Amino acid sequence: MTVHTPRDEQDASIVIREAADKGTLLNIAGNGTKAAMGRPNQTDASISSTAMSGITLYEPAELVISARAGTPVLEVMRVLAAKGQELPFEPMDYRSLLGTRGDPTIGAVAAMNISGPRRIMAGAARDSLIGVRFVNGRGEVVKSGGRVMKNVTGLDLVKLMAGSWGTLGFLTEVTFKVLPKQERMATLVIRGLDDNQAIEALSMALGSPFDVTGAAHIPDRDRRGGSTLIRLEGFRVSVDYRMNEMKRLMKRFRFMDILEGVGAEALWQSVRDATILTDQGNRAIWRVSTVPAKGPDLAAHVAQALDAQWFYDWGGGLVWISTPLDGDAGASILREATRTHGGHATLVRAPAEVRSTLDVFEPQSDAVMTLSRGIKASLDPAGILNPGRMYAGI
């Protein structure tokens, strides 16, 4: 497969325009760390943003940063950390889950709307993305959004590009709003709760005025006891006060500890990156978004039919589920569970031969599919950008 690595927007525009003229299907890529997600590529060539790297704008006082799409996420985080700032949405790193190498790029974070545990407080990557530059399927350079939130021109297009998986355009630059890095992190760990009790506790915490930035539950496995995690961040004095109040709120749950330091950071990283499930061997891994109160019922529904393991993030609104690699049978059970209890299931990890035969993403309604096809046709009329990556025929 031919791999194009344009050095700037003009190069990218030429590559895409020529591909559209010839009907050459293009795989849109960063550094390939998430190539094993979604439906397998159905393309003739690839265009990568890896040669388009570097911070193009950073104004710490304005809490805004712009970077070319191929810039490693770690480089962006390093530059922000030097000024005591961070990406507020805590982007997930898929490498351990997918068994891939290389440096994840900031363009992929935007294109896939990648967010972590702090989403419950800070919102998703989409909510922090305020500007994009990209080349559409005609080879035209498009700029949307701006450096400050007051500039609302094109914001809808910015949000549209977030989570589009490269099917609408080849991102060349992204702009994010950032926040000051938290001074202290502390986690209240409640032990011994079943799934329903844990979701009740997490809902109480999230409904409190104490600004919870992480709410997860790892169920009992191998009789080691379940762990319900409530994270607080901020100024040291504020965290002390809010943690004491949180403990009072949770006083009917008896077994509580406070975890800080390296151990707490490692624990939240395992929640963020779903590495809690990577010891499950060669199994399919699903990511299910649902109403928090429905999470335990949905997981139980799957467990009745499959040998499943799971854990909860986002207060129960995100359920990571590991199941055997049984193709259509496993997918049917997951889809039945989301139809019964509500939600959207995405197949995150499975061999290419499995992903090529299944609906990797939750099937869309006819009305939404019609709208999606219309948007795709307006930005990529020849249908050359990541065809079939999300849905067959789009």
Image (spheres, rainbow, N blue to C red):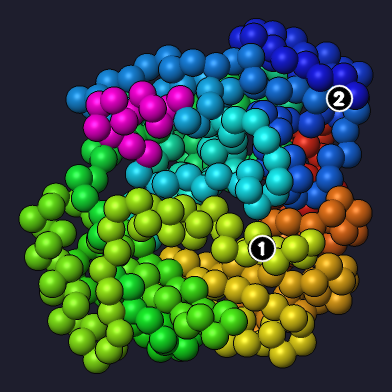
Q: Is 362 on the left-hand or right-hand side of 183?
A: right
Q: Position of residue 355 (x, y in %)?
A: 84, 56
Q: Position of residue 10 (x, y in %)?
A: 65, 8
Q: Is 102 on the left-hand or right-hand side of 360?
A: left
Say which quarter of the image contains residue 3: top right
Spatial CA distance of label 2 from label 1 is 34 Å
Is residue 81 within the magenta segment? yes
**Which residue is pictured at 24% across the width and 91% down the height?**
252
Residue 279's disc is 1
Which comes before the other along the chain, label 2 or label 1? 2
Say which quarter of the image contains residue 118: bottom left
Q: Position of residue 57 (x, y in %)?
A: 37, 17
Residue 45's disc is 2
Is 283 in front, or is 173? Answer: 283
Q: Amino acid at mark 1?
A: Asp
The answer to whether residue 150 of the structure is visible from this angle is no
Q: Amino acid at mark 2?
A: Ala
Q: Are marks 2 and 1 in contact (CB under 8 Å)?
A: no
**Which residue is pictured at 83% across the width and 14% down the height?**
18
**Which residue is pictured at 86% across the width and 50% down the height?**
352
Indicate whether 213 appears above or below 29. Answer: below
Specify the segment rendered in magenta: 75-87
Assign a secondary structure to mark 1: helix
